[in-house]
Amino acid sequence: MSADRISRRAFAAGIAALALARRASAQGYAGLGESADGFAKVTPGRTFTFPADHGPHPDFRIEWWYLTANLVDSSGAACGLQWTLFRQAAQPGPQGEGWANQQIWMAHAAVTRADTHRFSEAFSRGGVGQAGVTAKPFAAWIDDWEMKGFERTDDRTLSPLTLKAAGTDFSYALTLEADRPVVLQGDHGYSRKSERGQASYYYSQPFYRARGTLTIDDKSVDVSGKAWMDREWSSQPLDADQTGWDWLSLHLSSGDKLMLYRLRQKDGKDYPFGNWISASGNTQMIAGGDIQMTPKATVDVAGRKLPVEWQIAIPSRAFSISCKPLNPKAWMGTGFSYWEGPISFAGTHDGVGYLELTGY
């Protein structure tokens, strides 16, 4: 690698870290409650258009392409992986060219087994081709990490795709396929995050079938299972008094899917919300008053107490489960630190999924 490339990479990472650290110390988790003056606003009634909405929305302050996968290897052992690309605008306005571009890109990759959790992080400044997203054919990348489609990729299902990433002690390469369209979360894609108007545009592809290879410490295994991708963009997804969230994506053995979250508020009046997705892809919102999310056990990680075991109930659906992590130590010690890892659950329903805990 040339000295010029090294200095540009270092410059990009430094600028990104400074900008992101400023926001992280502002309001709420990662500064997501910070005022978004000058950026586009999230309002109800938007019509989603594909493939365009698979691509970036630079008029909004933040967005992400976020995939988690619950897998098993050839011996039947459970494992999981995460691939995430974040875009954050340092300031609003027309897009600058080259190094003057105000977009900052950040990516996280992780693999988790019962006995280990590995993660890596990458940064880039926009405008120089090192990171970005294109809508058709779909491609999201930073350096050689990528989530990539083909000419034949279906815009409705965002399938098939290939996925790859590598850290110093792990790597993975998957093929993702789905036979049902992406799912609009919330109210036709308008996802409220508070009673005071904070919201995001949000859709998911929870029906991916994943197959490929996972390598840890130079030992490769074949893996297969289920994957879930989330797409969100917003300019102020949290209110200033919201400190973080507890989020779950659940693959039920029946074929149904369930997305749940609660936004934690400083006054203790959390904001929960959910979406039940049938095996055929139909959705039904679940009102906050019908969701019971109760932490049952905590673990000490990185000087924090984290609620990694949960009791979840939705009385209107006679739904009651207990969730346990594959690895309680699945801490992402990245620039914005958080807990993210695969879980299993049992009770009135059983299956696997992912849990994310931020702001602790």
Image (cartoon, rainbow, N blue to C red):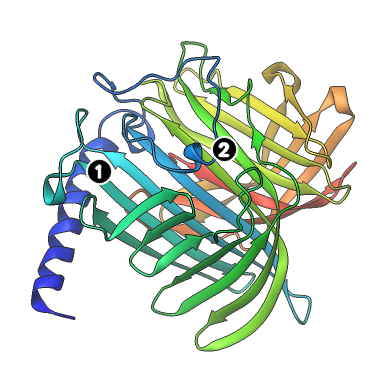
Q: Residue at x 36, y 21 (%)?
A: 240
Q: How many marks?
A: 2
Q: Nearer the viewer, residue 296 or 188?
A: 188
Cα distance between the residues tagged 2 and 1: 27 Å
Q: Quadrant of residue 326?
A: bottom right
Q: Which residue position is annotated with label 1?
A: 103
> Is residue 194 among what the camera can see?
yes
In the displayed structure, 135 sits above or below 199; it is below
Q: Residue 87: which disc?
A: none
**Left or right of 80: which side holds 121?**
left
- Residue at (55% x, 17% y) in the render: 269
On the image, the x and y values in percent for residue 174 come to 60, 69
At label 2, the amino acid type is: Asp
Q: Quadrant of residue 276?
A: top right
Specify which label sits upstream in the sequence, 2 or 1. Answer: 1
Residue 122 against residue 350 in the figure, above or below: below
* SS assignment at label 1: strand
Task: Describe residue 117's horizontal placement relative to residue 4 as left or right.
Answer: right
Specify the quadrant that holds the N terminus: bottom left
Residue 112 position, x and y percent, is 58, 67
Seen as rendered, the residue at the extreme bottom is: 218
Residue 32 placement, left or right of 181: left
Q: Quadrant of residue 56?
A: top left
Q: Amino acid at mark 1?
A: Gln
Q: Tell me the residue that label 2 is attached to.
A: 246
Closer mark to the observer between disc 2 and disc 1: 1
- Farthest residue toward the top? 196
